[in-house]
Amino acid sequence: MTQLVTGSTAKVRLTAEREGPRYYGHLWVFDSNVADVLGTPAAGDLVDVYTHQKRFFGRGLFNPHSKIRIRMLTFQEEPIDEEFFAARLRAAAALRRTVAPHATACRLVHGESDLLPGLVVDRFADVAVMQTLGYGMDVRKELLGELLVQEAGVKTVYLRNDAKSRTLEGLPLSKGFLRGEGATTVNIHEGKAQFTVDIAEGQKTGWFCDQRENRIAAALFAKGKTVLEAFCHTGGFGIQAALTGAQSVEGLDVSAAAVALAQAHAEQNQVAARCRYRQADAFEELRLLERNGQRYDLVILDPPAFARSKKAVPHAIAGYKEVNLRGLRLLQPGGVLVTCSCSQPITDEDFWKMLQAAARDARRQIRLLEQRGQGPDHPVLAGMPETRYLKCYLVQVF
C-alpha cells in the first residue's frame, strides 16, 4: 500500500483572531488566519498548527495556492497515517449503513462532515465516485482509492475530478477509473423507483443523493394529482410521484440530455404513459403556463444553486422569489408546493422570508406542512455552517 509521511513538514502559527469561539470546530484555516509559517511546506503537505500563544492546536493539510490555507484533519497529536484514513472511512461507511441501510445510492463521505475535508465520495451500488477537492486529499487519492475498496467494500472507484472548484486549489481537471474498470452507467433504486446514473457525464458525481428522502416525502402528496416538476433534471421527483399514483407528471428542464434521461427513467419505471418531459427554460415556461391558465395540484421546484457566495445572495433571492411566485400561481387552491434551494449562503430564514414575500405578491395564502433539508447521509458538522446547504419546504396553498 502507498506509504505516507505521517509527521508534519512545517509549523504554522495562527492569528489571535482565529482562536475565537466563532471558529470552534471549523476545519478551515484561511490565509488571513495564518500569522507565520516555520518551514517550507509544499502543497498537500501535513503541517502542525499552533495557537498564537504557541500551544498545539492540531494537524492539517497545507496548500499555499488556496485561500483555504489549511484543512484541519485532527485537533489531537496523532499520526496521520494509513490507519488514520482507514478509521475515518470505516466510520463514514458505518454511519451510512445505519442511516441508509436499503439505499443503493448514498453519500459515503461528505467531506468536512466526516472529518475528511476536501474529500467527497458517492456510492452507487458497487461503484464509488470520488472527488478530491483539496490538494492534500488529491495527492493521497491512490491511498484513498485502495482504502475505499477495503473499508467500504466497493469494487471500483471512479474519479470525477472535473469540478471547477479544483482550479482554486491549483489542481487540474480530470476524470476516469482509479480502481478497477467497468461501465460508466450504474442502475440504482430509490424506494420503489429505479434510475440509471451516468457517473462519467452526469452532474457532480452523477446523481443527487441529498434529495432522496425529500423525493419520497413529496410523492406522498401526488396520488391522483396533476404534477409539474420544473428544473426536473433527470426526473427524480416526478418518477416518485408517478409511482405513488400521480394522474400526470409534466417535467421541464433546459438540458436536452437531462430530458432524454428523464423520459428513459419514466419508461424504465413503466410510468411513461403518465409522464411527459420537454426541454424548456423553466422561468419562461412557468410564465407561459400561467398565462395559458394551466393549473396543477402539486408543483415541484428544484433549481440549481443561484448563489455560491454571500455577494450573490440578493440577486439569488430575487430569482427564487420569481420562480416561487410563478409556482404558487400555478397551483389549485389546496395544492402543494415543494420548493428547494441548494444555495449554501442562503439561510433557512432567508428562504422562508422569500417564500412569504412570493406568496404575498402572488396573492396566495400558504401554510407550512414540512421543513426538510439534506438527507442524513449528508450530515452537518456543527462547527461548519458550510456543510448545511439544502432547504426543502412543503407548503399548502390557498
Image (tube, helix red, strand yellow):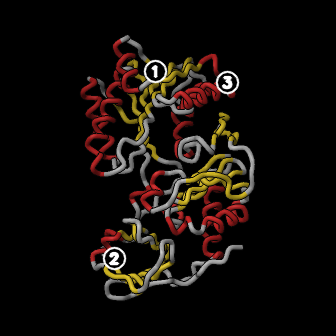
Would you place residue 346 above or below residue 119 in this image? Answer: above
Q: Are marks 2 and 1 in contact (CB under 8 Å)?
A: no
Pointer 1 local density, CA inside 10 Å: few below 14, some 14–19, many at least 20: many
* Residue 273 place in picture, x, y as percent: 63, 16
Residue 379: x and y, percent? 51, 56
Query: Which label lies toward us, 2 or 3?
Result: 2
User: What is the secondary structure assignment of the residue under circle 2?
Assistant: strand
What residue lies at 43% left-to-right and 32% top-to-bottom?
Answer: 301
Mark positioned earlier in the residue sequence (2 or 3): 2
- Three-letter amino acid code at disc 3? Glu
Amino acid of disc 1: Asp
Where in the figure is residue 41, as x and y percent of width and height?
A: 46, 79
Label for residue 34? 2
Residue drawn where x is 40% and y is 57% of the image: 386
Circle 2 packing at 10 Å, graded few (<14), some (14-19), many (20+), is many
User: What distance separates the C-alpha of mark 1 from that of mark 3?
Assistant: 23 Å
Give residue 297's mark: 1
Q: Which mark lies nearer to you, 2 or 1?
A: 2
Q: Nearer the viewer, residue 299 or 221?
A: 299
User: Does residue 7 appear in the picture of this structure?
Assistant: yes
Q: How many marks?
A: 3
Which residue lies under the disc numbered 3?
267
Label drawn at residue 313: none
Circle 2/circle 3 CB separation < 8 Å: no
Is residue 123 placed above or below 306 in the rendered structure? below
Q: Quadrant of residue 11?
A: bottom left
- For the residue carrying disc 3, how many other residues have a C-alpha within 10 Å: few (<14), some (14-19), or many (20+)? some
Which secondary structure, mark 1? strand
Amino acid under disc 2? Val
From the top left corner, tell me how far across and down residue 210 is, in percent: 53, 46
- Find the distance from the CA under tag 2 to the CA under tag 1: 54 Å
